Image: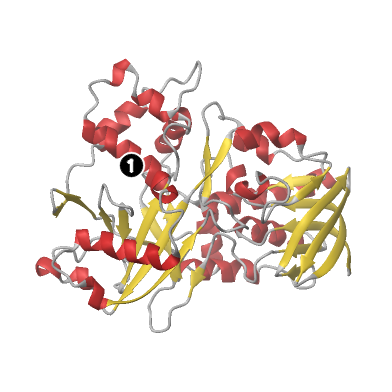
């Protein structure tokens, strides 16, 4: 089936693709927006729960730091960002407490990451002789933050990239908020910005092949077993990093003809971190009443040494939902478990936090998503490998004013790994396409 010819084709209807399509459509271009899934959002994945004041967010959930593009989109709908109330509790010696987070020591240490010379992995940096006096608690905190927030391998992630991210107020150390109405509200705003006269959206449409030359793109795709074809002068590629890195023939992989040789170095200097997320639903938010309401204001619980080392609540909403989170090596160790086994493990780990509560009897349901098993994501979000300082910028560079690239892994302004970075990248790719077409 021939879908016709368009000014631009946007591949992927996640945050980046939706933002790009909106800008192109507003500029008067005819746009074909293709999405492999049966839904919009990509790694935004809100699930409505009857009777719950909040949706279950199986993908992105928080807003970190400045997040200018996220805030701008929410303002268009008269919405804001809600503070999550950053109260953390950590399990130590069988008791939940609020120990010093060693943030002053960590901040001072990261300022010592060398800005020049050969880049080191974070683990190599921490193992240098001059870090010998680093407190074991601070070292464990750094490694835990990198695994939990960056979903990264400390032996592979660039120490310089970590230092730059944290000094710029990255996800691991910035305050967290939630979009008012959850990420469903943002998706509704993005979808509502698509001019139906200019933007043709097709869901369940899996792009298989992109054949291109200067100012000419041909797309081969499948939708429910039917082969589809479309043509355009330009394409905006918003495929996740893991999909761009996938070998030919792998589930979810897209073939480019000719291959993207100019992107090989950048793709080799970035990695897509694994994340497993389990959302547990209970009859009540029972942790709010334990120990005389001691944890009523708790936003995050940390349980070092278990499979899911981080849990969080739905604050500022008082909902009976508890999220279990495993990133990096923790997620990799869960890779062989089935969904029922993941849920059982999350409940078991939560019981370490709340031994006074009968979680098994209070539990009523769960949702889970393993992003590295997801063929259209192949990982949760990106991180920079040792020696890859310019990789995000290089990945974003257009090819022959024909292929433009967006997605969180292409953002080099400090928003990589975030929804705001994805939104910004989609906007910038579309604006550059329009500017270079003139």
- Left/right of residue 122 with respect to residue 224 in the rendered view: left
Q: Quadrant of residue 352?
A: bottom left
158 over 437 or under it: above or below: above
Check the image and name the residue furthest to the left: 292
Residue name at image x 77 percent, y 49 percent? 255
The residue at 70%/69% (across/down) is: 204
Q: Residues within 10 Å of mark 1 (few under 14, many from 20)?
A: many
Q: From what the image shows, is residue 350 above or below residue 283?
A: above
Q: Quadrant of the N terminus?
A: bottom right
Query: Is residue 180 visible from the viewing direction of this image?
Result: no
Q: Is residue 47 above or below residue 16?
A: below
- At 55% from the left edge and 59% from the top edge, which residue is drawn? 43
Q: Nearer the viewer, residue 243 or 230?
A: 243
Element type at marker 1?
A: helix
Residue occupying the point 46% across, 23% down: 120
Q: Which residue is mark 1?
A: 144
Q: Quadrant of residue 15?
A: bottom right
Q: Nearer the viewer, residue 307 or 433?
A: 307
Residue 357 appearing in the image: yes
Q: Position of residue 165 (x, y in %)?
A: 45, 37
The quadrant holding residue 145 is top left
Q: Position of residue 122 (x, y in %)?
A: 41, 29
Image color mode: secondary structure
Left or right: 67, with 432 as reference point: left
Q: How many marks?
A: 1
Estimate the x, y position of residue 262 in percent, counting from the top left. Answer: 75, 33
């Amino acid at each position: 089936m021939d879908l016709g010819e368009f000014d631009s084709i946007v591949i992927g209807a996640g945050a980046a693709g939706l933002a790009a399509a909106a800008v192109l459509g507003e500029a008067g271009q005819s746009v074909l927006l293709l999405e492999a899934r049966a839904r919009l959002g990509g790694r935004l994945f809100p699930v409505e729960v009857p009777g719950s004041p909040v949706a279950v967010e199986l993908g992105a959930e928080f807003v970190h730091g400045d997040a200018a593009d996220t805030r701008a989109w929410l303002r268009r709908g008269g919405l804001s960002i809600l503070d999550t109330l950053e109260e953390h509790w950590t399990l130590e010696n069988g008791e939940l407490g609020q120990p010093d987070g060693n943030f002053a020591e960590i901040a001072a240490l990261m300022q010592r990451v060398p800005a020049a010379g050969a880049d080191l992995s974070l683990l190599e940096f921490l193992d240098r002789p001059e870090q010998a006096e680093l407190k074991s608690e601070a070292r464990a905190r750094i490694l835990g933050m990198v695994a939990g927030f960056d979903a990264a391998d400390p032996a592979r992630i660039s120490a310089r990239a970590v230092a730059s991210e944290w000094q710029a107020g990255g996800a691991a150390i910035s305050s967290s908020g939630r979009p008012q109405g959850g990420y469903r509200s943002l998706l509704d705003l993005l979808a509502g910005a698509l001019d139906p006269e200019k933007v043709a959206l097709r869901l369940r449409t899996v792009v298989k092949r992109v054949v291109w030359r200067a100012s000419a793109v041909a797309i081969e795709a499948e939708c429910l077993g039917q082969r589809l074809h479309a043509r355009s002068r330009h394409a905006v590629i918003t495929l996740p990093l893991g999909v761009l890195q996938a070998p030919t023939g792998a589930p979810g992989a897209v073939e480019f003809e000719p291959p993207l040789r100019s992107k090989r170095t950048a793709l080799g200097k970035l990695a897509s971190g694994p994340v497993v997320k389990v959302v547990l639903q209970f009859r009540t938010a029972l942790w709010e009443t334990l120990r005389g309401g001691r944890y009523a204001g708790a936003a995050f619980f940390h349980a070092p040494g278990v499979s899911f080392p981080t849990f969080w609540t739905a604050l500022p909403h008082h909902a009976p939902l508890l999220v279990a989170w495993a990133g990096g090596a923790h997620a990799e160790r869960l890779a062989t478990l089935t969904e029922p086994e993941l849920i059982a493990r999350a409940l078991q780990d939560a019981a370490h936090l709340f031994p006074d509560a009968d979680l098994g009897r209070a539990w009523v349901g769960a949702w889970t998503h393993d992003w590295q098993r997801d063929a259209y994501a192949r990982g949760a979000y990106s991180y920079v490998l040792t020696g890859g300082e310019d990789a995000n910028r290089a990945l974003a560079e257009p090819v022959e004013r024909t292929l433009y690239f967006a997605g969180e892994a292409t953002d080099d302004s400090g928003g990589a790994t975030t929804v705001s970075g994805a939104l910004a990248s989609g906007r910038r790719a579309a604006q550059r396409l329009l500017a270079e077409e003139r």
